[in-house]
Amino acid sequence: MKMNKKGEKKGQVTIFIIIALLIVAIGVLIYMFYPKIFSGAETEAKSPSVFIQECMEEEIQNTVTTVSLQGGDYAVDENSGYIYKAKDEEEIGYVRYLCYTNEDFASCINQEPFLTEHIESEILKTITPTIESCFASLVKSYENKGYDVNLKNGTVEVQITPNSISTDFNRTLSIVKGDESKRYENFRVDLDSNLYDLLEVAKNIVIWEMYAGDSLPESYMEENLNIKVEKKRKEGDVKIYIITDRNTEEAFRFAVRSFAAPVGF
């Protein structure tokens, strides 16, 4: 009887070892191959509009942030801006003058009368190479799957509206393989943004700088509690304005060089 029990125990131990080895082997196989299988299934299920959304969204957001912190231009230098560095920034950069005069004791001249439209154009110009790259990748992905692909290009539009920045690519993708044919439209990326409101404040400040040589940030914050307006005075009648949405932390900043004449000057 003792010998049989020992034999049974050895048999059970052997079975447990085999099961454990099988579990380990299955785990290794899942680790090695499941991500690839899942990724492949995800790619097949991903719609072209989602593909473009994921490809473009970060590029658009980064461009909007850069343009907003530099006064409306993606590239600013000493010819068009004032050198500036915030406390939390690692690198020194330039902030564009939106109102400027090179004369002493004079009010400034508006450098960008159509500010919102200019920024829309600046964003579009900056993201265009990435747009072409993303759509080329999309076309290639279907060609690699054996589809005949036709991409019809339209005019890309960037619009800054209340609560949103929209990029409409106006492109149509048609794919054909055998009896299967599909058509995709409405390629578009929408970002939640309050940049529109920040720009309205900036434009109003520029008007005051043009005609009075100065502005009162407190008045804007009294009218809209969600907006913070800072005015940092620099040498040579230069001011840096920083307009921030208190809820989203979005910011738009720009430079001004203007002279506020005292009463009776």
Image (spheres, rainbow, N blue to C red):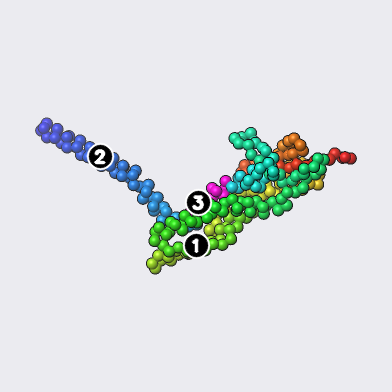
Q: Tell me which segment is drawn in magenta.
A: 50-62
Percent position of residue 44, x then y: 41, 56
- The residue most toward the top is 2
Quick one: SS at disc 2?
helix
- Element carrying mark 3: helix
Dot 1 or dot 3, earlier in sequence: 3
Residue 152: image location, x then y, percent: 52, 63
Residue 151's disc number: 1
Residue 60 lies in the magenta stretch? yes
Left or right: 117 in relation to 48: right
| Circles 3 and 2 in contact, beta carbons < 8 Å | no
Residue count near mark 1 (Cα–Cα under 10 Å), binned few <14, some 14–19, many ≥20: some
Q: Which residue is denoted by mark 3 in the rendering? A: 55
Percent x, y of residue 261 = 84, 40
Residue position marked by numbered label 2 in the rendering: 21
> In the picture, which quadrant includes the N terminus?
top left
Q: Nearer the viewer, residue 227 or 11?
A: 227
Question: Residue at left 65%, top 47%?
Answer: 73
Residue 4 in view in this figure: yes
